[in-house]
Image: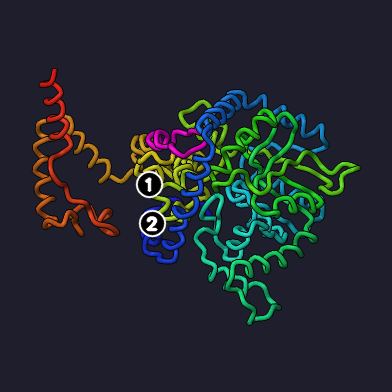
Amino acid sequence: MNVSTSPKFKENVHGALRDESLQRALGRLKSGFQINRTNAVLRMPEFDALRDQARDIKNHTLENLDHYLLKFEENVKANGGHVHWCADAAEAREVVAKICRDKDAKSVLKGKSMISEEIGLNDFLEKQDLKVVETDLGEYIIQLRNEPPSHIIAPALHVHKEQVADSFRETHKGRDPNRSLVEPRELLDEAREIMREHFFAADIGITGANFLIAETGSSVIVTNEGNGDLTQTLSRVHIAIASLEKVVPTLEDATSILRVLARSATGQEMSSYTTFSTGPRRSDDLDGPEEYHVILLDNGRSNMLGTEFQDMLRCIRCAACMNHCPVYGAVGGHAYGWVYPGPMGSVLSPSLIGVDEAGHLPNASTFCGKCEEVCPMRIPLPKMMRHWREREFEKHLSPASFRYGIKTWAFFASKPKLYGALTGIASKVLSKMSGGKGRIAKLPLAGGWTDMRDFPAPEGKTFKQLWTEKQSVKGGSK
């Protein structure tokens, strides 16, 4: 998806809220991811201690990032692999294309990789006359539908099985048109048969990397399907694409973070497959690629180091923040307009494509704090979203009505007596407007709120009145 679509968030939201199919699909978040994570955490009393350990590992790594990246490169080369340093998306795409040209490749298999989405790799390679096939089932489904992912670990979250069946019938030609594609197992079996042909024919296998281990020069992928292993072992060349912050010092560090990753993402103790790749196939190996390449992508990450946004580089892409975010849960991932949705995207996207393009995304938050509460790396997402809101306001990127509204509120808020009097009057007026129902269906100057939901009418005293009374009681009891 082009970054130019990012500023259309408000327009996208209106469409998402009215999309009945999407709303049904988003209901799976609470019944699936949220409950599974809660149960997984309850089964592990030391979970919070592990979160502290994971945070500290990444903080140490980021403070010494140059050292560990160079050590990683040294060990990749020692194992017979190649490392390519890429400053931006264009460089990374060109490196992949050159490897494909050098090998006279005709087909490319891909495991799930958000970095490849970030750099627009598929479209680029297809323009080089390469056949590109996504092997993760969710990614394969949305590739057939010509859509971007709507979730970073469940890319086809927004798609129902009936829609998958329609895509299969349209794309998988030469099969019995009357075949049953009603049950999930039938869909899976057909995808497996189709994918098997691609696995044996592919020249290049491309994966992402959940971790890069400096100590050994290994890349690590975490999946729940065997596609990741087959993509990188059956192809003649394996290319792992990862951003700079994916490096960790040691095997022990990687396994420590793995203990919080799957539990936070899907509620599993461990993912079905955790695969460590170290260099190309050796003479006594039964399988593996002839060549092993790692692309280290910056694309704006180094600009985050030493800033108030450095903590975002601890992210391990578990998606716990979006699984629990009430905004994401209402509008889905496509509304955000770029690769990374939800709270993590609201911080990362402005960092990578600029506040001019994505400065509106940090406003898509209730600031309930649930994202930080569930983050396994203890990333202070609400705080960083506030920083981006400040940047947007300072650059006058927010709507004029919003800026004037803030200034008007600040004027009254700086005069406590006047503020108290006006809020008291407003509360009484709003309460009367509800007609005793406790809610208001339509409210002037608040159409953005009441368009899709009722406005709760004030009941009883204001917070300031209650606070004053509480302080008076405390003072009288001394």
Kind of residue sitting beneath label 1:
Ala
Using residue 66 as the reference point, say whether residue 19 is left or right of it: left
Is residue 90 a member of the stretch shown in magenta? no
Q: CA distance from mark 1 to mark 2?
A: 10 Å
Identify the residue position indicated by label 1 in the image: 364
Front one among 391 and 435:
435
Residue at 25 percent of width and 46 percent of height: 401
Magenta segment boundaries in residue numbering:
372-388
Is residue 377 a member of the stretch shown in magenta? yes
Q: Which mark is residue 197?
A: none
Q: Quadrant of residue 440?
A: bottom left
Residue at 76 percent of width and 47 percent of height: 238
Identify the residue position indicated by label 2 in the image: 13
Q: In the rendered view, tell whether residue 130 sits above or below residue 165.
A: above
For label 1, the SS is: loop
Task: Please tell me how crowded label 1 is: few (under 14), some (14-19), or many (20+) other residues with Cα within 10 Å.
Answer: some
Which residue is situated farthest in the bottom direction here?
Answer: 178
Tell me residue 308's x, y (percent). 46, 29
Task: Tell me if label 1 and label 2 are in contact, CB under 8 Å.
Answer: yes
On the rendered image, what quadrant is the C terminus found in? top left
Tell me residue 150's x, y (percent). 51, 55
